[in-house]
Image: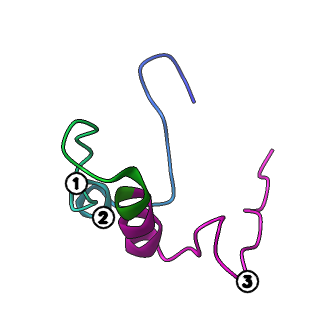
Amino acid sequence: MTEGRVCIDRTRDDVTQAPACDPELLDQNEYYGSLYNHYGYTPFWGAGYVYPRFHP
């Protein structure tokens, strides 16, 4: 990270195609479930959840 910039291991298209968040209209559990699914992770409340690796 630098001022004004964050680097992640995802493409721009992958991030822009992620589910949109609208806390006024969406069920939060449904939103987070779709977000985890989009990035290929098991939700923290799901069976088989593994904590993400730490990258110093």
Q: Residue furthest top?
A: 3
Q: Earlier in the sequence, mark 2 or mark 3?
A: 2
The N terminus lies in quadrant: top right
Q: Position of residue 53 (x, y in %)?
A: 77, 62
SS type, badge 1: helix
Residue contact between numbered discs 1 and 3, judged by CB atoms under 8 Å? no
How far is disc 1 from disc 2 in space, using C-alphas?
6 Å
Residue type, numbered disc 1: Thr
Q: Position of residue 31 (x, y in %)?
A: 35, 58
Q: Nearer the viewer, residue 23 or 39?
A: 23
Residue denoted by label 2: 14
On screen, residue 23 versus residue 36, left or right, reads left
> Is residue 15 placed above or below 3 in the rendered structure?
below
- Of tags 1 and 3, the one toward the viewer is 3
Q: How many marks?
A: 3
The C terminus lies in quadrant: top right
Residue beneath the point at 76% across and 72% down: 50
Residue denoted by label 1: 16
Q: Position of residue 13 (x, y in %)?
A: 23, 62
Residue contact between numbered discs 2 and 3, judged by CB atoms under 8 Å? no
Q: Nearer the viewer, residue 52 or 11?
A: 52
**Residue count near mark 3 (Cα–Cα under 10 Å), binned few <14, some 14–19, many ≥20:** few
Does the stretch in magenta take in 37? yes
Q: Position of residue 24 (x, y in %)?
A: 22, 36
- Of tags 2 and 3, the one toward the viewer is 3
Q: Main secondary structure of the magenta part?
A: loop
Residue denoted by label 3: 48
SS type, badge 3: loop
How far is disc 1 from disc 3 in space, using C-alphas?
27 Å
Does the stretch in magenta take in 26? no
Provide the residue span drawn in magenta: 32-56
